[in-house]
Image (spheres, rainbow, N blue to C red):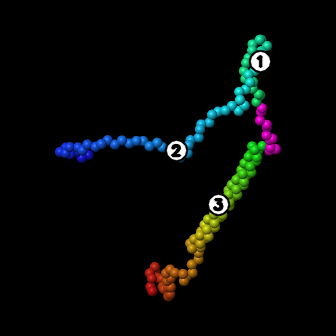
Amino acid sequence: MYPEHTDRTPAVRAPEVHQPTPITPAAPYPAPLVPVQPHGVPTIASVVLPDGRVVTGYAMSPVQPEPVAAKPAVSRAAVNVALGGVGFLAVCGGLLLLTTFITALTALITQLITLAAVIFGGWIAVQVFGHRSETSGGNTFHIRKAVFKRNHFNG
C-alpha cells in the first residue's frame, strides 16, 4: 500500500526455522475390527450327480425360518378403520349441529327484520292516514256574520 523506503539498506534477518510439534491424541484410537468367522471354516462336501458329474462346495446348514408370531384376534387395519369411522361420525354430528344452528339463527334474524318492518310501516301509516284534531295545528278561520251578495264579500 505504501512505497518502501529506498534510501536505507534493508536489514538482513536470520531465517527462522519452525519445527513441527507432534500432536499426541488424548485417547488412543481403537483398533479397527477384523472380521472373524463365527464357526471357523465350514467343511467341504462333494455330491455326485446322477449323470456322473461331481459338484464340490461348502456344506451349509439349511436356513431355519423365523417363528411366526401369533396374530392378534383383530387386525390393526380393522381397528384403524373402526376408529376412523367413529371419528367421521363425530365430525358429521358436529357439522349437522352447526348447520342446524346457522339455519335457526338465519330464521330468527329474518323474523326480527320482518317484525321491525311491520312495526315501522304501521307507525308510518298512522302518521300519514291518522285523524287530526282541530287543535293539532294548521290555520283555522272563524267567519261570523259574513254576508255574501252577488259574489262579493262584505264583512
Place of residue 100 in the rendered image (x, y in percent of width and height, measured from the top left): 69, 58
149 horizontally vs 123: left or right: left
- Main secondary structure of the magenta stretch: loop
Which of disc 1 and disc 3 is earlier in sequence?
1
Q: Is 89 above or below relative to 150?
A: above
Residue type beneath disc 1: Val
Q: Amino acid at mark 3?
A: Thr
Mark 3 and mark 1 residues within 8 Å of each other at the beta carbon:
no
Q: CA gap, disc 2 to disc 3?
A: 80 Å
Q: Farthest left residue? A: 7
**Which residue does the image show at 63% across and 63% down from the upper left?**
109
**Is residue 40 found left or right of 50 in the rendered image?**
left
- Identify the mark at residue 106; answer none if there is no mark: 3
For the magenta stretch, what is the residue range? 64-74
**Regarding mark 3 in the picture, which secondary structure is present there?**
helix
Comparing 20 with 91, the one in front is: 20
Q: Quadrant of the C terminus?
A: bottom left
Which residue carries the number 1 mark? Answer: 47
Locate residue 50: give its quadrant: top right
